[in-house]
Amino acid sequence: IYACADYSRTIDLDRKRDEIREFYQNLTIEDITGLLSSISGNAGINVVTDEVNLLNKSDLHFDGRPVLHLDIGAAVVPDDYYLRGIVRSAYTGNGWAIPTGAYRSKNRLFRRLTAENRMPQTIFHSDHVDELRTSDGRFPVVRCDVTALNDERVNFLPYQSIFDIGTKYRYDIEIELESTEEYSFWLMNNARISWEQFSANEAPSENALISEYEAFVFDQYLKLPDTKQLEQLKAQVMPDMPADSLPLLDRLNAIRDYIWARAEYTLQPGTQPDDRDFVEYFLNEGHLGYCAHYASAAVLLSRMCGIPARYCQGYVLTYGDFVRGKTESDYSINIPDYQAHAWAEI
């Protein structure tokens, strides 16, 4: 475009050049692969990319090697912290993926959420966040520096982390810092957080922007593949589920109990048949699984009960890590590979 002989530089062309450059800088191979693979089916209306294929994992084996190193200020409250990283919402029958087309259609909404510092991955999304400020108007935070010891593609960040306005996000699912190898953030002092005040939020929000996001949540995070296996699973599950009028926690407890009654935890569940739905096989025949099985089942059963949910993978920073990592001035912590985890975001 710009190498032609009669090219003349103008403000409009410079602007267009910058737009094209930004577009291609943000384009990933997963975008292209997802687009090409979807053309014959849905013509790219809701392109699905970056699939976490659960069938490929099968049995898990850990050697205890460290995967993340954290240096955390001494004022932190030792506790368990979930470091969220890979978040997926489109269930494929054998894993979880990103519905790229659906997310891109809401880019304007996500940009507005970012501008107002109300992205849902952070505590700022809550209407109650100001209640955590100290008398001088500040948040009680400590510095956390992370070094990823593997070749990671995402940042692993706790729900208690705080970021500056203008932080980059990937849709509404992942926070993108400048590097995935070495990065820093402010960690909210856990002793100041009452999680009940956050979970007390219920839709619809009085905030028009948050209400618009809630509509997106109920549109996207209740979707299930239209398959015979899932239809049969839903018919089997629903008689054991409580009424929609009961409190959310009661309904989630019923989902948890349903899964626990049908499954046994193990890191060696064996190979699953390729032609079976991952969750349906886990609950009805395999009955063996680890966190990815439990989390996937929890998300699907929540959706069947009308509760929006999605799948998340990351690591757990435990209280014991703080005990072992205490130094004279702060905490120096290595997180081993066996603290990888998967859970449901409700």
Image: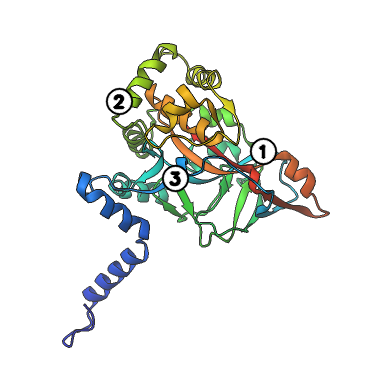
Q: Residue 149 — which label?
A: none
**Distance Cα–Cα, label 1 vs label 3:** 25 Å
- Dividing the picture into quarters, in which one does residue 277 lie? top left
Q: Position of residue 314 (x, y in %)?
A: 56, 44
Q: Residue 52 — which label?
A: 3
Q: Position of residue 51 (x, y in %)?
A: 40, 46
**Distance Cα–Cα, label 1 vs label 2:** 40 Å
Left or right of 242 on screen, residue 314: right
Q: Which residue is mark 2?
A: 228
**The residue under label 2 is which amino acid type?**
Lys
Judged from this view, the residue extending furthest toward the left is 6
Residue at image point 68% right, 53% down? 66
Residue at image point 45% right, 40% down? 55
Residue at image point 36% right, 56% down? 30
Judged from this view, the residue extending furthest toward the right is 328
Numbered disc in front, either 1 or 3: 3
